[in-house]
Image (cartoon, rainbow, N blue to C red):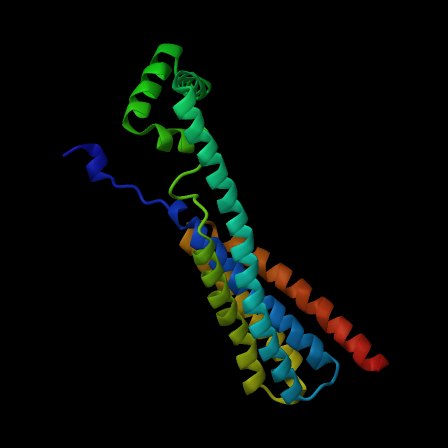
Amino acid sequence: MSRLRQLPESHFVDRIGWLRAAVLGANDGIISTASLIVGVAAAATTQHDVLIAGVAGLVAGAMSMAAGEYVSVSSQSDTERADLARERKELADNPEAELDELAEIYVKRGLDQPLARQVAQQLMAKDAMTTHARDELGISEITTARPVQAALTSAVMFSVGAAMPLLMVAVSPTGALVPIVSAASLGFLALLGAIGARAGGAGILRATARVTFWGALALGITAGIGKLFGTVV
């Protein structure tokens, strides 16, 4: 048995597409809904009104995340398809120039000219389009844009994230809404940062601190605005 078979490698890059959308959705759900709740609660509104505002924020936010992700990732997908169509035409019209171009890419990566040309010839003989998409355009199966997947993942995870501070509103006494929702939301954000880092194989401490800091900043600003306007009104 070869050494490669004895030592299988585990990578996380194939999770980039859905993991990015999931973390973004859940993070946005927690921060935006918790900030909305804290801002409204700081303005001395009733618990019922705070809950209604939170639910409205959940629904609107989930729809916004789904639409935004779908539109943005679709734009990326359109660009990829246009580049692939252009590359396919160039391969059909001038394959020798495309071979030279591919060989030059391998030279820049460290191969000498004869070996680079040999590698380019063999790869193009097997699958020229896939080879040029990957090595010239940087488009691969892992990085390919998936609009529907991104939209659904973001919407679902936004709803999950937003449901957490809403649950705190339902179980907290009216007078303690702001501190309880704030503390619980920061705890949820820290947990999300740790889970996201773990799923992506990154450092847990840095990811947790990063997401918690920005969440605390958002909560603090909205609480201050809610308090200010609540007092003025």
For the C terminus, the image quarter is bottom right
Q: Is residue 165 left or right of residue 89?
A: right
Q: Which of 166 and 207 lies nearest the eye of the viewer?
A: 166
Q: Which of 84 and 162 lies nearest the eye of the viewer?
A: 84
Res. 18 image quadrant: bottom left
Q: Is residue 199 left or right of residue 231?
A: left
Up-down: is 151 above or below 16? below
The residue that appears at 52% across and 75% down in the rendered structure is 164
Up-down: is 182 above or below 80? below
Q: Which of 219 and 119 lies nearest the eye of the viewer?
A: 119
Up-down: is 75 above or below 131? below
The residue lying furthest to the top in this view is: 114
The residue that appears at 73% across and 67% down in the rendered structure is 221
**Rendering coords of residue 151 (x, y %):** 49, 60
The residue lying furthest to the left in this view is: 1
How many numbered marks appear?
Answer: 0
Residue 197 visible from this viewpoint: no
**Rendering coords of residue 45 (x, y %):** 71, 86
The residue lying furthest to the right in this view is: 232
**Rendering coords of residue 47 (x, y %):** 64, 88
Residue 87 visible from this viewpoint: yes
**Rendering coords of residue 36 (x, y %):** 66, 73
For the N terminus, the image quarter is top left
The residue that appears at 62% across and 68% down in the rendered structure is 32
